[in-house]
Amino acid sequence: MKTLQDRTMAAVGILLGIILISIVAGDRIPLSIRVFTFGIALQCVFFSVIQWSLCRSDNSRPWLIGWAAISTLMTIIVIGIIVLHFRYDNQEQLIAGMEPATALLVFGVTLTPFGYVFLWTAGFFRTIFPPGSSRRLAQLSEPDRDKD
Amino acid sequence: MDDYSLILWTIAAYLVSCLLIGAWAASKTKSSRDFFIAGKSVGPVLLAFAAFSTMMSGFGFIGGPGLVYKFGVSSFWICCPAILGFVVTSLLVAKRFKAFSDLFDILTLPDAVAVRYQSRLCRFLAALVILLGVTAYLGTNILAFGKVASTFFDIDFTWAAIGGMTVVILYAVFGGIIAGIYTDFVQGLIMAVASVALFWIALTTVGNDSFTAGPENLTRAFREHGLGEAVGPWGLLGPMACLGFIFLFALGGSGQPQIATKYLMQKDFRTVRWNLLIIAPAYTLCILLWMSVGFAMKYLVITGSHEELSDADHAAPVFLLEYAPAWLAGIVFSGLFAAIMSTADSFLNIGAGVFTRDFPKVFMRRKVANELSLARTSTVLLAVAATAFALWAKNHGDLIAILGTFGWGLFAAAFVPIVAIGFNWKRATWQGAAAAVVIGIVTNVGLDLLSKYPQGEPVYTIPGSVSIGAVALLASLITLIAVSFLTGPQKLDKRIEAAIDA
């Protein structure tokens, strides 16, 4: 495990193992603990994978901070749904005709991923496909192309 | 003209336009490169619509509302993470596939896998998974087409399925993936526009002609009839199942060959920048149809306005025929047939690649001389074999249903580790990739059989209604990471390293 990528992947493997245990353990672990564990580990897996896929230059830092901010917002929304649902089950108050937790799901979980879309579009040439990347590929692409 | 005739003519006009697209695409298809990856000439708008339509497919019209009818809000956790899934796929797969296809002769997903891992075993396993998955998807699509067409046109099921596949063969054989992409584009437009109209109609139906009263009427009716959980944030399946859906559908999209291979077709990666701005809003509009029609139909049933449906998958067709204007029903049914047919076309194309590119390279260690002819012949044979198999399996237990349920999960468990992870992580080895694919297949098939048999008293069911695909994906990812660390690092060609670093 010499590289940052390797260490990140080892961490992802451990997180995936935790998720698997939280699933197969079933009722041996209280539901609320399993849901929190699954939810948090899931966000960490996504962030680690994305971070490790892009964390190759200093240019990607603002992008990763943006991704982390949106992911944190998403985590807060999911935790909000869990709290609202478990604490105020079947309440009378409705928001836009829905239970508060369902309304948070419909508006929060649907719209938040647009933040990632914005990041992708806005940071495309700075982080996803910087000019150096396209030049390197162009240099390598023509000679002995059909050798595989 | 009565309503039925209007719907019929709309569908007929649409099918004819599909055949015309096929004929036009045939004139553009001159090589296997055109046949499989559209000559790497697909621009951002077409690519975005093709990826989105392939993802939504007939499932968005029929299966989605059916799941809402059956499980309530739980279904929301399937369609909602898909937007995140497109972002993840774009990040992990789009750029790598562009880089690999620029550097190597790659037309199929197993081509890419063979290049990345320098392994014929990995190519063989990838091809095997594709054949299994393609059989599953083609089988379910043929049966879906037969089901809808035989009911709608009042003809024999077998003839309906054969008729549908004949149209598919005609435009898939001659037009290749180019025909599929343009049909996907039209289908995507129809779905996005029709979804808004149907959303409006569904909520005004539930709200007694008031759009804004719709959600409240729905929530209160569900609670009054003891179905409050269905309109809660987790629906009837519970939180663990919903989190499993996020994992499977946000990460699993990057392992679907019908989506991943679309990124081999890009003309210029720089234009992919705009893809997500098209995909995300279009997909969000389709979520409106998915959720509102399923809920509206359930509302009508529980309030006694409509009799109980014999099958949850009838929710959308029944709503369209009985509650939507005929012109809209005609357009949506056309979109439905187009979705099924373009999906079948995509899978036939991917399956033909196995016989044209992958098996010859695995077993004969060389390319065949005339790939385009073999691709067209393979498409016909695969379509005929899949139709025969689907019709046979329909009368022999629930084989197609078993295959159909793990189609997405099988592709996710097999390909997310070796494609989405392995194309970004240099330390991933061919042994890890091969082990991950095998574990993906075994876990999917094994858990599916254990959870179904013996009937009534299955050996094992996953706690919390978590989907089999999610558990299989977890198992295969862990396998890739563990086996790759346990085996020695693989020496990579400098161009492979460059493609991974790009």
Image (cartoon, rainbow, N blue to C red):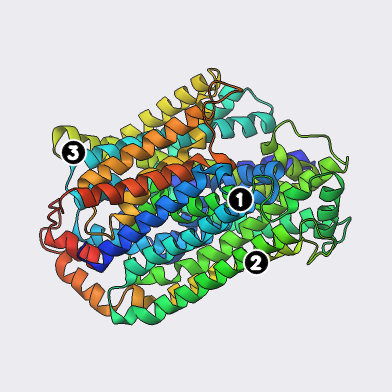
Give the mark nearer the N terminus: 2 vs 1: 1
Q: Quadrant of residue B431?
A: top left
Q: Which mark is residue B361?
A: 3
Where's residue B407, x and y in %?
Answer: 46, 39
Q: Which mark is residue A31?
A: 1
- Could you classify mark 3 by the number of other residues whose Cα lies within 10 Å: few (under 14), some (14-19), or many (20 or more)? some
Q: Secondary structure at mark 1?
A: helix
Q: Who's the residue at 19% across and 36% down the image?
A: B362
Relative horizontal placement of residue B137, taking residue B63 as reference (left or right): left
- If the image is split into quadrants, where does the C terminus of chain B sit? bottom left
- What's the CA distance linking mark 3 and mark 2? 53 Å
From the image, tell me which residue sits under label 2: A80
Q: Who's the residue at 62% across and 41% down the image?
A: B12
Evaluate if marks 3 and 2 touch, with contact meaning CB atoms under 8 Å apart.
no
- What's the CA distance linking mark 2 and mark 1? 16 Å
Regarding residue A104, the answer to whether it shows in the image is yes
Q: Nearer the viewer, mark 3 or mark 2?
A: 2
Going by the numbered disc 2, the residue's amino acid type is: Gly
